Image (cartoon, rainbow, N blue to C red):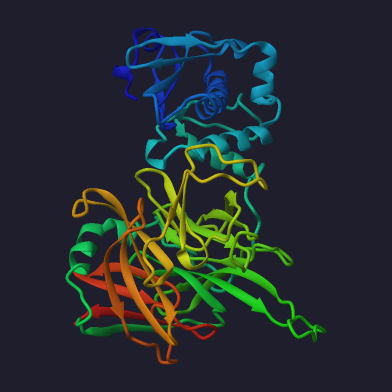
Amino acid sequence: MLYSECPAHVRSSSGYVVGKWGQLVLVPGQDTESPAKRAVLTAKRAVIARKFELETLSRQDYNTFFAWHGHHHPHHLQPSFFTKAQAFNSIAISHASSEEVIGGLLARKTFMADLIRDVLSYIPASSRQKVVDASSKMMNAVAAINAVNATALLTLFSTISPAIRSVNVTIHQPGVAIAPSPLPAPNPSSHSEEIIRQFVQLDRTTKWALVEKIAFEGDTYEPEGIVRLGDGERYFVASFQRIYPLPGDNSPNPHYEGFAHLLIFDSQGSRVASATLTESGAAEHHAGGIDYDGTHIWATLGQNKPGPNSTATLVRIDPETLHVEPMLRAADHLGAAVHDVETGNVLTLNWGARKAYVWNLRYKAAPQPAFTQPRALVANPSHWVDYQDCKFLGHSQRFGFRPVMICSGITKLYGTVIGGVSLVDMESMVPLYEVPLTMRSDQGALVTKNPMDVAIVDGKLRLFFLPDERNSTLYAFEAA
């Protein structure tokens, strides 16, 4: 919401306006308090704004906005709801309820870091326009902060109170960055219209040329998802390791222990780093297909069995640090994950891609380990191949600006394994265009058996496949 769009009583006051999707924008005003106090009030406003925005407002049904105005005393912060018609109701925050909501923000800087992080998780990176002025009086942890944005403020506090799942990270190339810096834009969605234009010209008679072949170093276990960052500087592979059978287990159906991994390779296939995403004994240890949105890698960790007695956790991973952030839990196995950066929707596929669950993380997820209910559940009307790995392409003009993803997979029919790649409508799961592929790896696997990525390279559509397990080679194909 722009400053010029604010009602007069908000423009004349000091605080922040929070748009209906959580955008925080500074509203200039007549606040004469010190920068340190202003920074603390800013953080308080953000916390309470997030609480009311997510639990009180209906974003779908009302074009409602949220503002702070009027009072400078910490216990007199007063939120107002108003529409573009400028109708509003005030809800007073008393001393007691303010302390309950804020949770001792002034006294506990570790809690402050968690609260700021919690708020920022609902704000698109492109909308983080909040600016905080602070001085050495703010907290002992901060010597001097001058005109830094909220993301930078969070970074300063993140060393105090991390709110991420710890993972076991091994660096194989010391001194080499895990991911390109700065993080590149995602290839599929950055070239979506050209990818779609060239893809719909393919058919079953298309001749394919192998244009690149990269052997990945070490044991890759069972690759489930892959994303290619930049011009191939890095390949991130989500993989599932099965230790089978366990020592001493001589039963007819021996048990096994499983781990989910994220393996990172450079352009030559050398391993840069690897992260074990799950702990020993974790029920949810199976990785699925992954997607990269320019900021995070979206992945799933699920039980290695289909529903209804299965569960999974949707996570997002920082590609620069490999820190894992659990987003929500689901009462079903989840495989591929795809993030629509325009709507905030995350689509996940269950076992065999027979159903698609649609989540929107701009709505509050259930506190874990409770299960979150999806915003939508869509049956897959296609019975051609079971999608293993998918990538978000964007809202395509060719298909009426509907959200489109590209997916690959295989299926077994009458003793025959078939594979292919599809453009899929993310709202209906209806395939928009399908192409069968018959290429095989050197080990004999159909190239679409495991993960896939797509890019435009030198003006041409290029598909990347990693079909083999344990000893994996990346195959890149272009239409001849």
The image shows a total of numbered marks equal to: 0
Residue 72 horizontal/vertical position (percent): 54, 10
Residue at 37% over, 40% down: 126
Q: Is residue 237 above or below residue 112?
A: below
- Residue at the farthest front position: 414
Residue 413 horizontal/vertical position (percent): 42, 81
- Residue at the farthest right position: 248
Q: Is residue 324 above or below residue 452?
A: above
The one nearer the camera, 150 or 401, is: 401
Residue at 40% over, 64% down: 390
Residue 176 horizontal/vertical position (percent): 49, 68
Residue at 33% over, 17% down: 84
Work out which quarter of the rendered image holds the N terminus and state it. Answer: top left
- Quarter of the image where one finds residue 76: top right
The one nearer the camera, 70 or 462, is: 462
- Quarter of the image where one finds residue 198: bottom left
* Residue 142 makes an appearance in the image: no
The one nearer the camera, 296 or 364, is: 364
Left or right: 288 as drawn, with respect to 431: right
- Quarter of the image where one finds residue 455: bottom left
Residue 238 horizontal/vertical position (percent): 52, 68
Work out which quarter of the rendered image holds the C terminus and state it. Answer: bottom left
* Residue 244 makes an appearance in the image: yes
The one nearer the camera, 280 or 369, is: 369
Q: Is residue 191 above or below residue 341?
A: below
Left or right: 288 as drawn, with respect to 109: left
Q: Is residue 363 above or below residue 357?
A: above
